[in-house]
């Protein structure tokens, strides 16, 4: 509104200035008539300016009235809002005052109840003490004595009940575990079959004619001596038609000699230099076969990541047999069985497979190193950073070391199943029985022995002695003497554990 007023004033002043200037100019430069015309024009302009000023002032007043009315309306609205808020605040204050009064009233009531409860509790305690005194007077026992008597009777009753329950649980667990074990073993054996390779301690090389025997022997025996010196194998040339036999305790050397002699016979040129060349080529070929066999066995057993040097040694078992059972196939078969058992028993399948696959690793080097194959295999596995759990399975599979893990026990079971299943080994029943009887006979020859039993397929002899005739020191001496006599008088694979059992039993009958 102020801006409109200022604009009107400026316009009026401007009109007056224009009129004055025009009047002055008209007086100076123009004629009188022109001056009059200019005055009339100026008067008209001035009148128009005044009219516009009056309109502007009127509009400014109207605007001021409108704004004032609008401000009064807003002020009234805000005043009403403030009044409503004040009313709400007052209402809430009244509500809070009422709640505070109610809370104080409840607090007073609770305090009264607490006092009443405290008083009643005191009365109950006095009543309980009076009852205890009356009970003690009637029973003739103090409260401590009665509590001790009650606890003793309760403890005895609980122990008897716990013992009965424990026996029932043990019986149920034993029955269930036996049933579950039979199911696991039957399922495992049913899922696995394997061909068995016959045992050969002598390799036979066919020759085209008996004339070839003379060429193999050579002048003054130089060819046969060169072949035996290069391979470490004995050549047996006898009256057997069209065949030459190779005899050697080491199956790898025997295989090298067989391959070399076969190549020499096919080539026809047999002399010491040629023999050495063929033996070297055969050695390389057999070594390659060993490496491939080790890798193939690891793949079949689902045991990846085994150190290449271990596989090179492990592959030698391809040419090793035990009672007609090929040891490489036995290892793979044991790995499959161990994997199945571990799956059924919720054990570590990978450790069980690897332990079963490598459990006879020591048999690949026991011709060259002294010691049992279980400990030799464990030592070789340690050298190439095999997992400790797998190493324990290897060293414990014949109880040279006590099995402390489920996986080690699984490897023992898998080894026994693979070796003892029907058709696995070609040892005759008659020879097997004679070997067990011989073991038992060696132990029974000693004084103080009551009974002797060959167990675990002849791997252990359990000797029961008379406790009144043999004391603890004599029992240890007897175990050593029996083991020495077995070493001196019998032939057997691997090792035999001698266990002497001395026990005293007290038996009485309740009538």
Image (cartoon, rainbow, N blue to C red):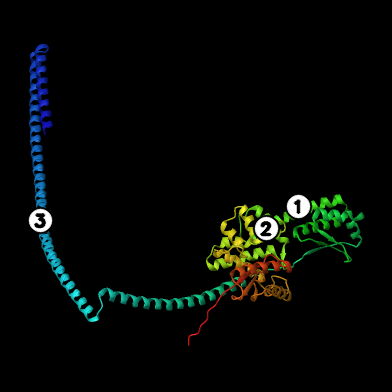
Can residue 336 be seen here? The reply is yes
The nearer-to-camera label among 3 and 2 is: 2
Indicate which disc residue 284 carries: 1
In the image shown, does 138 or 399 lie closer to the viewer?
Answer: 138
Can residue 37 be seen here? The reply is no
Q: Is residue 493 left or right of residue 134?
A: right
Between discs 1 and 2, the one toward the N terminus? 1
Label 2: few (<14), some (14–19) or many (≥20) C-alpha neighbours in 10 Å? many
465 in relation to 380, above or below: below
Q: List x then y, in percent, for residue 457.
A: 66, 71
Between discs 3 and 2, the one toward the N terminus? 3
**For the image shown, how many numbered marks are present on the structure?**
3
Spatial CA distance of label 1 from label 2 is 16 Å
Indicate which disc residue 91 carries: 3
In the image shown, does 190 or 154 lie closer to the viewer?
Answer: 154
| Secondary structure beneath label 2 | helix
**Which residue is at the far bottom?**
511
Q: Are marks 1 and 2 in contact (CB under 8 Å)?
A: no
The nearer-to-camera label among 1 and 2 is: 2
Spatial CA distance of label 1 from label 3 is 107 Å
Spatial CA distance of label 3 from label 2 is 95 Å
Q: List x then y, in percent, for residue 129.
A: 19, 74
> Which residue, given by chain and number where applicable, does mark 2 sit on?
314
Q: Quadrant of residue 7?
A: top left
Between discs 1 and 3, the one toward the N terminus? 3
Q: List x then y, in percent, for residue 156.
A: 37, 77
**Image point (49%, 78%), residue name:** 171
In the image shown, does 133 or 387 lie closer to the viewer?
Answer: 133
| Secondary structure beneath label 3 | helix
Label 1: few (<14), some (14–19) or many (≥20) C-alpha neighbours in 10 Å? few
112 in relation to 25, above or below: below
């Amino acid at each position: 509104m102020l801006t409109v007023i200022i604009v009107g004033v400026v316009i009026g002043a401007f009109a007056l200035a224009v009129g004055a200037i025009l009047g002055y100019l008209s007086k100076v430069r123009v004629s009188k008539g022109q001056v009059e015309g200019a005055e009339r024009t100026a008067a008209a302009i001035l009148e128009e300016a005044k009219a516009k000023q009056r309109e502007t002032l009127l509009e400014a007043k109207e605007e001021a009235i409108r704004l004032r009315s609008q401000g009064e309306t807003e002020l009234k609205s805000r005043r009403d809002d403030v009044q409503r808020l004040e009313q709400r605040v007052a209402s809430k204050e009244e509500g809070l005052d009422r709640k505070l009064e109610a809370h104080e009233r409840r607090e007073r009531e609770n305090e009264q109840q607490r006092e009443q409860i405290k008083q009643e509790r005191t009365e109950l305690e006095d009543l309980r003490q009076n009852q205890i005194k009356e009970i003690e007077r009637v029973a003739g026992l103090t409260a401590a004595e009665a509590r001790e008597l009650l606890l003793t009777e309760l403890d005895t009753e609980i122990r008897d009940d716990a013992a009965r329950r424990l026996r029932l649980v043990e019986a149920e667990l034993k029955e269930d575990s036996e049933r579950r074990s039979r199911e696991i073993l039957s399922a495992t054996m049913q899922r696995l079959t394997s061909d068995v390779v016959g045992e050969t301690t002598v390799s036979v090389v066919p020759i085209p004619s008996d004339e070839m025997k003379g060429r193999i022997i050579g002048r003054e025996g130089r060819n046969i001596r060169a072949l035996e010196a290069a391979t470490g194998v004995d050549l047996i040339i006898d009256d057997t038609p069209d065949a030459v036999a190779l005899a050697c305790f080491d199956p790898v050397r025997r295989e090298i000699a067989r391959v070399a002699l076969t190549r020499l016979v096919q080539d026809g040129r047999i002399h010491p230099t040629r023999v050495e060349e063929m033996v070297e080529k055969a050695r390389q070929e057999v070594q390659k076969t060993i490496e491939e066999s080790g890798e193939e066995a690891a793949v079949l057993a689902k045991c990846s990541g085994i150190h290449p040097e271990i596989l090179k040694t492990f592959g030698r078992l391809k040419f090793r047999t035990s009672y007609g059972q090929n040891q490489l196939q036995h290892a793979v078969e044991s790995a499959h069985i161990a994997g199945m058992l571990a799956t059924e028993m919720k054990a570590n399948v990978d450790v069980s497979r690897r332990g079963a696959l490598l459990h006879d690793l020591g048999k690949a080097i026991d011709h060259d190193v002294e010691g049992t194959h279980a400990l030799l295999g464990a030592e070789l596995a340690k050298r190439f950073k095999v997992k400790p759990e797998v190493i324990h399975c290897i060293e414990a599979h014949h109880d040279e070391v006590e099995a402390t893990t489920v996986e080690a026990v699984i490897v023992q079971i898998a080894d026994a199943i693979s070796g003892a299943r029907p058709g696995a080994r070609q040892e005759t029943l008659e020879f097997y029985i004679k070997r067990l009887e011989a073991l038992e006979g060696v132990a029974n020859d000693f004084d103080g022995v009551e009974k002797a039993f060959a167990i675990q397929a002849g791997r252990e002899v359990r000797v029961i002695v008379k406790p009144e005739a043999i004391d603890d020191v004599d029992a240890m001496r007897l175990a050593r003497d029996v083991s020495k006599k077995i070493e001196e008088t019998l032939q057997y694979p691997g090792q035999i554990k001698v266990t002497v059992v001395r026990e005293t039993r007290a038996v009485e009958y309740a009538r």
